[in-house]
């Protein structure tokens, strides 16, 4: 079965600091997808990025960047120059095909990021 | 695109009562998921619909849980004879297409069973 580990339960930084959120996954699939979602206090999960297992290029989107390394089964997320609005719980997720052949996501436990002014 | 809508936002019920939640997905999204999230945990998959067909149910979904999606539009999740362990946030998500298209989540329904 798929497994996602986010070892950092909570991280607290001061505004403008860089912060990296770790994600380690386990899968036997050769083709899979990895995701990051953000959950602000309002509760709605917001999609940030999707990566497929064949694309190991790092990606940058504004202050956000992602480092995908198949060799270490990691998909880490870095926020550069953090802002108070980045405060949220961040979830890493891994695709899984169910026994019935349906697609679903397996989520990690999340990392709560607090950015202090 | 008005987003995924869930009602009610909060529900407090006494143990043993039945509750029903509603999810209105983004229009024309043929795929709909229900997830459950407890405090300090990530969302856990409950069930999946493709159009009106319920294609997958998690082992987490006991016989007290039932979900429907009539006509492939909105969906309802009913919990019968609620237990305190059912207290959680129930999240609905929808998407279109395949290939693990990103899920669009609603704000969730927070259930408290007293």
Image: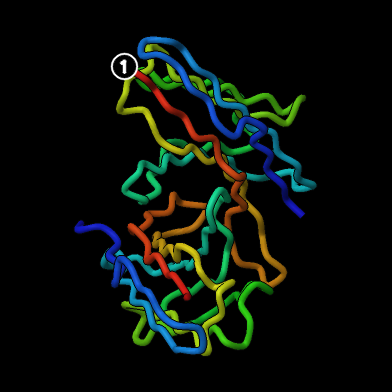
Q: Which residue in the protein does label 1 denote?
A: A117
Vertical order, B27 against A22 (above or below)? below
Q: Quadrant of the N terminus of chain B?
A: bottom left
Mark 1: give few (<14), some (14-19) or many (20+) Cα within 10 Å: few
Vertical order, B24 against A74 (above or below)? below
Vertical order, B45 against A27 (above or below)? below
Q: Residue furthest right?
A: A28
- Which chain's residue wears label 1? A
Between residue A72 and residue B14, name the one nearer to us: B14
* Residue occupying the point 46% across, 36% down: A49
* Residue occupying the point 68% across, 65% down: A98
Between residue B98 and residue A26, name the one nearer to us: A26
* Residue occupying the point 37% across, 74% down: B12
Percent across and percent down for residue A5 are 68, 39
Locate residue A30: give its quadrant.
top right
**Please, what secondary structure does the residue beneath circle 1 have?**
loop
Percent across and percent down for residue B83 are 56, 80
Name the image colouring.
rainbow
Between residue A52 and residue B104, name the one nearer to us: B104
Percent across and percent down for residue B61 are 61, 77
* Residue occupying the point 66% across, 60% down: A97
Locate residue B63: give its quadrant.
bottom right
All told, the count of numbered labels is: 1
């Amino acid at each position: 079965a798929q497994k996602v580990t986010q070892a950092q339960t909570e991280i607290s930084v001061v505004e403008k600091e860089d912060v990296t959120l770790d994600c380690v996954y386990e899968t036997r699939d050769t083709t899979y997808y990895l995701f990051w979602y953000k959950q602000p206090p309002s509760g709605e999960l917001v999609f940030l990025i999707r990566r497929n297992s064949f694309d190991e290029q790092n990606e940058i989107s504004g202050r956000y960047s992602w480092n995908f390394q198949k060799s270490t089964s990691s998909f880490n997320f870095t926020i550069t120059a953090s802002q108070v609005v980045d405060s949220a719980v961040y979830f890493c997720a891994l695709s899984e095909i169910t026994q019935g052949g349906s697609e679903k996501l397996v989520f990690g436990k999340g990392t709560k990021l607090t950015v202090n002014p | 695109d008005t987003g995924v809508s869930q009602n009610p936002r909060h529900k407090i019920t006494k143990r043993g009562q039945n509750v029903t939640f509603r999810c209105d997905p983004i229009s024309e999204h043929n795929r709909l998921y229900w997830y459950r999230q407890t405090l300090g945990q990530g969302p856990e998959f409950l069930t999946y619909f493709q159009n009106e067909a319920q294609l997958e149910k998690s082992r987490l979904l006991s016989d007290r849980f039932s979900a429907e999606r009539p006509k492939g539009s909105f969906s309802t999740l009913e919990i019968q004879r609620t237990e305190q362990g059912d207290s959680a946030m129930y999240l609905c998500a929808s998407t279109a297409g395949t290939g693990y298209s990103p899920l669009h989540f609603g704000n969730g329904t927070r259930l408290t069973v007293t």
